[in-house]
Amino acid sequence: MIMIDEEDPIPMDLGGYRHRDGSDDEDNGEAEFQTISETVSCLARCLTEDARYLCIYDVAQKLTHPGDYDIGGTHAPGYRPETWFYYTTSLCPNNIHLLNLFVCHRKTGSCLIKVSESTEATHINPSPGDTSSRSELTETLASYNIFSSRPDQHHYIKTYCFTKKDIDALKNTLLIHVQIQTDTIKVLLKPNVIRRIKLAHDFGNLLSNKEKTDFVLESSSGKKFNVHKIIVVAHSPVLRERVRDSRSSSLKLDINNEDLELLLEFLYTGTIKEVCKQDCLKLLGIAEQFELKNMFNLVQYVINKQIDVNNAVDVVVLSEKYHLEQLQANVFRFIRDHPAVLDTEGWRNLDNVHLTKKMFKYIYSFNNKKG
């Protein structure tokens, strides 16, 4: 059983990225596209409600040179900043290049962000004398709901995978279709409830004192927990859907008392205080059941700090089961650098042929590059 060490602080902004404030950017020149008012970039201001594209310049160069890059921000009327988009690039085995898209939500509250669903692209060639050569990702959009309990909170949105062939076909500028809608949770809640919740800055205190609750969650054994609907629906797509479809002020869940208490602690505080007493498998199970992206990130971060020769194979199996790609890449690197893992009982008992091949393929591709 992999346990969590409470001594290490748990940062919720895992990328550690320091955003730039796009609200005060000055225009550096005329934009290349007619849709400048709809384009999020570092060249001009863009109203949040008008945003239709995320603009990435020199895209091939950035995909082939891993790093952290800004896209730009959006603002509300009056130039009040609302979002700032940025991305990281990285290289995976088999010459797969990743573009990981993030947003810094400048306000508290909810936000619905829709972006191009895949890397399927249309390549637009300019007419003679026109310099607006560009590639546009698919207009089919994938939706992502985020909720920020404090200003300037960072959220992972999506990863795009590009092959070398994809990169060779890309034009100099890449446009990712985007739509942004703020304060999306308000439609589920009564205005007076929202006002009361906003008066409380410490959601942990709300959990402990149970004041002015407006909903009940019930465990599988029948124990009832008074909660605030705005907190419950903010972080979990599963709970959001269940609450929306509920015709009463209560909802029974398939979860035991202890796990429901952990779930509520995470929903209200964004972390688990007594993490040293919790089993990572239990936390991963809760994260999977309620689609808690940030809980997955929390557990990945903690496990990653505790990988050793004896538990490395267990971590590999966990990363595969729960599709924790970053954790899997890290543990593969650990095994590559610590061959003693191959002499452990965990390795001898590993009977997943696909996973074994996947790991050796990673190690082999690295050794080829190194050679």
Image (cartoon, grey):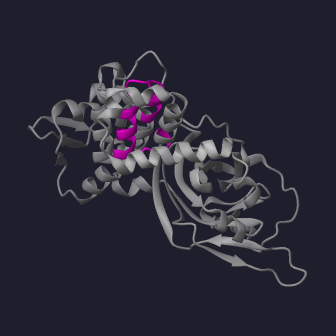
Residue 212 lies, in percent from the top left, at: 28, 36
* Near-viewer residue (98 or 351): 351
* Near-viewer residue (161 or 273): 161
Work out whether residue 61 can be spotted. yes
Establish if 69 lies above or below 41.
above
Establish if 273 lies above or below 176.
above
Q: Is 124 left, or right, of 234 in this rendering? A: right
What residue lies at 77% left-to-right and 80% top-to-bottom? 125
Residue 105 colored magenta?
Answer: no
Establish if 251 lies above or below 313.
below
Q: How many marks?
A: 0
Q: What stretch is highlighted in magenta?
A: 300-327
Residue 307 colored magenta?
Answer: yes
| Residue that protrudes farthest toward the bottom in the picture | 127
**Quadrant holding the C terminus:** top right
Residue 129 lies, in percent from the top left, at: 91, 81
Residue 326 lies, in percent from the top left, at: 50, 42
| Residue that protrudes farthest toward the top in the picture | 7
Residue 137: quadrant of the picture: bottom right
Work out whether residue 322 can be spotted. no
What residue lies at 22% left-to-right and 36% top-to-bottom? 226
